[in-house]
Image: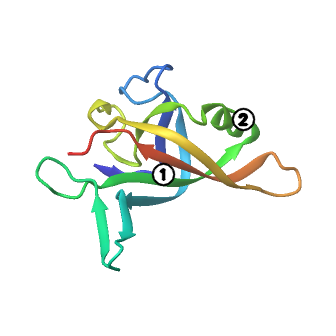
């Protein structure tokens, strides 16, 4: 596997390229994995603190691996990203096999939850730096 400067991301309804990856390929300039768990903390009437965590069948705390990607996009690409908000998507992370090798084993189900930090580049405002948030939809292992 190789670290690339792009991800493959598209709606689940769009289809795949010749390598089995989601159809659209997006250049990225940054990537931040966001590991999270679900937990609640509360205090009993006695003052004792209790933490409740979601656990799997082995009693291990369930971890979710989500992502934030920083991208440089055109206005047309930004409009397409906005149309994808809230939709289930397929992702191939930027760490994947080379072109002309099947990407199918690396396709992950994600929800596209947020676009933020939309910053125009230059006074013409036809390119933008944006950050997108993707949430893992896979069942925890």
Image coords of residue 6 (percent x, y): 49, 46
Image coords of residue 118 (percent x, y): 72, 53
Q: Which residue is mark 2?
A: 79
The residue at the point 72 percent across, 42 percent down is 74
The residue at the point 55 percent across, 43 percent down is 113
Image coords of residue 93 (percent x, y): 40, 46
Q: Nearer the viewer, residue 131 or 104?
A: 131
Q: For numbered disc 1, what is the local secondary structure?
A: loop
Q: Nearer the viewer, residue 88 or 92?
A: 88
Which of the two marks, 2 or 1, is nearer to us in this view?
Answer: 2
Question: Residue at the right extreme?
Answer: 123
* Left or right side of 36 for 115: right
**Which of the 4 image quadrants contains residue 15?**
top left
Instruction: Sort mark 2 into few (<14), some (14-19) or many (20+) by Cα contacts within 10 Å.
Output: few
Instruction: Sort mark 1 into few (<14), some (14-19) or many (20+) by Cα contacts within 10 Å.
Output: some
Image height of 6 relative to 37, above or below: above
Image height of 95 relative to 21, above or below: below
Q: Quadrant of the C terminus?
A: top left
Q: Nearer the viewer, residue 119 or 109?
A: 109
């Amino acid at each position: 596997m190789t670290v690339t400067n792009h991800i493959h991301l598209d709606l689940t309804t769009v289809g795949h390229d010749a390598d089995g990856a989601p159809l659209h390929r997006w250049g990225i300039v940054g990537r931040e994995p966001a590991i999270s768990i679900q937990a609640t903390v509360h205090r009993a009437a006695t003052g004792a603190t209790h933490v409740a965590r979601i656990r799997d069948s082995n009693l291990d705390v369930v971890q979710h691996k989500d992502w934030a990607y920083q991208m440089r996009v055109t206005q047309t690409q930004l409009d397409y990203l906005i149309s994808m908000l809230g939709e289930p998507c397929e992702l191939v992370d930027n760490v994947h096999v080379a072109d002309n090798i099947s990407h199918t084993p690396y396709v992950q189900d994600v929800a596209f939850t947020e676009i933020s930090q939309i910053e125009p580049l230059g006074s013409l405002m036809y390119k933008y730096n944006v950050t997108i948030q993707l949430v893992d939809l896979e069942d925890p292992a």
